[in-house]
Image: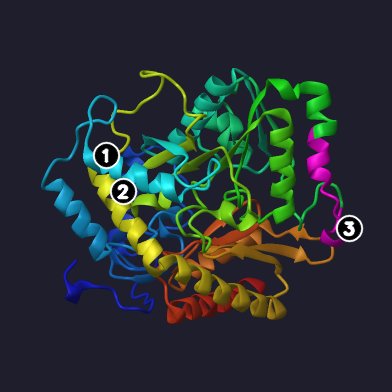
Amino acid sequence: MPPQDAPSGRPHIATPLPGPRARAVIERDAAVCSPSYTRPYPFVMERGEGAMVVDVDGNRFLDFAAGIAVCSTGHGHPSVLAAMQDQASRFLHMSSADFYYEPIVALAERIARLTPVGRHAGDARVLFTNSGTESVEAALKLARHHTRRDLVLAFYGAFHGRTYGSLSLTSSKTTQRRGFGPMLPGASHVPYANCYRCPFGRTPDACDLECIDFIEEFPFKHTMPPDEVAAIIVEPVQGEGGYVVPPARWFQRLRELCDRHGILMIADEVQSGIGRTGRMFAMEHFGVRPDIVTVAKGIASGMPLGLCIARADVMDWPPGAHASTFGGNPVSCAAAEATLSLVEGGLMENARRQGERLLAGLSRLAERHPLIGDVRGLGLMIGFELVTDRGTRQRATQETTRLVQACFERGLLVLACGENAVRLCPPLVIDDAQSDAALGILDEAFAAVEA
């Protein structure tokens, strides 16, 4: 994007929303695109830079959705674009399924050093995919292959993707599963550690991790023999389920349970990984090393790329057992190398610092806006839950929808998650002024919805 066309650092709405050009695109979309897409508001993107985006009518927005936590280095980062252009000038594709090329090896070496699997850094192997759901499919197949077991345990509220294997592990919303049964045999769900809405009626100060005991006392005793369970798959921070952050000791108990029964732990870091939480991987916050990690979204700053990373001794399947024609595309690998350099070079620390700033600001907003029932998050993976009554914690679902729309009308792009939560997952490049601008718009939007 030429510098003179770069969007400025402040939102500016110049037309009614949607504007005439946006309406025209939306009408064309309705005629030819699948109706299964979910569009919460009529934003039609034309260009972007950093954390600012411009629609086809020239309206400027502050992007706190980042393509669903994908554009980790912002829109059009020069270092990422340069790396992609350099690789594209050499070759676009060769297929990791049948051929060797250096970019995929270099990225695998780097990822193996960074990912918290195995007993030490580098004790890992990497399989390349195109997306998060493909990475979960690979992890599911690998776990079953390695353990020679067929059962898999996931958590209520989880989102692991929409293809059949990953959909069988997903339980975020019934609409994602309705009409597609039967699901993959062997997949079951148990409650996640949601301390704001504990399914066992506990408060954090009285919690004895009953949600871990439940696994032993019910599915493992009645429906899922633990010696037939291949894996437990878990999001370090539940994404679509509401940006729920569990306590560290829950993960430690879960790791102990897996070890006791010879069960593999799969950490789905598709949304939480690559610096978003202020650490390279969110599992690092909890002091637990999983056996398999899935990655996608922010790894390549918007280019399609997914990873299934496993302990070297776990990734023991033979040639032909699993592969992908486009997985590990060389241009995507180049984008990922540049992304990792930027994340390690300061963006991960910025995510931590800006996350603290936003969490503090949201806590201040909660003092003025009774709709805010809970504020939680790690780094720039932040959620806040809306309630009609803080005492009963009645979910404010309609108000959540209206808040997202009110933010859009004022030039801030955010997304809902769960039944009644809003997520903030901006590019990791945001600065103090942009964080404060987002908080200011949220303040106005809450006032409008409450009025």
- The amino acid type of the residue labelled 1 equals Asn
Confirm or deny contact between disc 2 and disc 1 (CB under 8 A).
Answer: yes
Q: In this view, does 93 lie to the left or right of 54?
A: left
Q: Where is residue 168 in the image (x, y as percent from the top left)?
A: 59, 29
Q: Which of marks 2 and 1 is in front?
A: 1
Q: Please tell me whether residue 15 is drawn above or below residue 418 in the rendered image.
A: below
Cα distance between the residues tagged 2 and 1: 9 Å
Q: Please tell me whether residue 436 is drawn above or below residue 321 in the rendered image.
A: below
- Residues 233 and 4: in front is 233
Q: Where is residue 153 in the image (x, y as percent from the top left)?
A: 67, 31
Cα distance between the residues tagged 1 and 3: 50 Å
Q: Name the residue under label 3.
A: 206
First to last magenta residue range: 202-215
- The amino acid type of the residue labelled 2 equals Met
> Neighbour class for label 3 at 10 Å: few (<14), some, many (≥20)?
few
Q: Name the residue under label 2.
A: 303
Q: Is the magenta stretch mostly helix, strand or loop?
A: helix
Would residue 197 be visible to someone looking at this image?
yes
Mark drawn on residue 329: 1
Image quadrant where one finds the N terminus: bottom left
Q: Earlier in the sequence, mark 1 or mark 3?
A: 3
Confirm or deny contact between disc 3 and disc 2 (CB under 8 A).
Answer: no
Q: Position of residue 69 (x, y in %)?
A: 45, 56
Cα distance between the residues tagged 3 and 2: 45 Å
SS state under label 1: loop
Mark drawn on residue 68: none
- Residues 166 and 280: in front is 280
Residue at x 88%, y 58% (from the top left corner):
206
Residue at x 37%, y 75% (from the top left corner):
13
Residue 3 sits in quarter: bottom left
Q: In this view, does 330 lie to the left or right of 365?
A: left
